[in-house]
Amino acid sequence: LRPEATDLDARISALSAAQMERAGITRLEELALQVPGVQYHPLGLAIPGRVNSSIRFRGMDVNSQVPTFQLGTLFVDGIYVLGGTHAIPLDDVERVEVVKGPQSAYFGRGTFGGAINYISKQPSMEDYAGELSATGAQFDEYDIAGAFSGPLIPGKVAFRVAARSYETGGM
């Protein structure tokens, strides 16, 4: 997989939903493995816990979980996500933008190393559409996701509803 890149190849990467689906990317951990210079740890490093995830760019890190001290941050449609980044699935994402380097002027504090921005899928103003996916594996692991969208008032108001249920089981 090679993310589409701009002329600033080392600084900006964007992966579309189709690219992520072909590569089997369903979580931020898997996305970080495909984008050079990005590391992600869902359970934090200095302070472990489910809400203390750690996004690092180009190996830079801080030894604090205070949000204003972070070097990399996750955004959904430009809105800051405070902790628990591993709980946000990539199922309902149109594309992911990864911007390396200081982004404080655009995204605000906590982005000295860079930012990851999920861009949500938009509903159609004219047509109804639906998606369904299911995966199963050994040791009680499953993942079921679905979405439905369409117009409420054609050409003016539309909706999109998505849901996901998953279990990782255990050995």
Image (cartoon, rainbow, N blue to C red):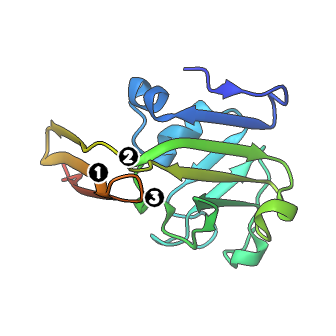
Residue appearing at x 40%, y 52% in the figure: 155
* Circle number at residue 100: none
| Marker disc for residue 86 | 3
Q: Confirm or deny contact between disc 3 and disc 2 (CB under 8 A).
A: no
Residue 72: image quadrant is bottom right
Q: Secondary structure at mark 1?
A: strand
Q: Residue at x 78, y 73 (%)?
A: 69
Q: Identify the residue at image location x=49%, y=72%.
A: 51
Nearest the viewer among 80 and 69 is: 80
55 left or right of 86 in image:
right
Please name whichever residue, 3 or 50, is drawn nearer the observer in this view of the structure. 3
Tell me whether circle 2 and circle 1 mark residues in contact (CB < 8 Å): yes
How far from the left and from the top, in percent, is residue 121?
Answer: 44, 48
The amino acid on which the numbered mark 2 sits, given as a three-letter code, is: Ser
The answer to whether residue 111 is visible is no
What residue sits right under mark 1 in the picture?
150
Work out whether mark 3 precedes mark 2 in sequence or the reverse, and give the earlier one.
3
Q: Considering depth in this image, is 66 or 6 the residue closer to the camera?
A: 6
Q: Is residue 129 left or right of residue 54?
A: left
**Numbered mark located on residue 124 in the image:** 2
Dividing the picture into quadrants, the one containing residue 62 is bottom right
Q: Position of residue 60 (x, y in %)?
A: 80, 53
Question: Residue 122: where, in percent of width, then height?
Answer: 44, 50
Of the residues tagged 3 and 2, which is closer to the observer? 2
Q: CA distance from mark 3 to mark 2?
A: 28 Å
Q: Check disc 3 and report its element: helix, strand or loop.
A: helix
Residue 15: tell me if it is visible.
yes
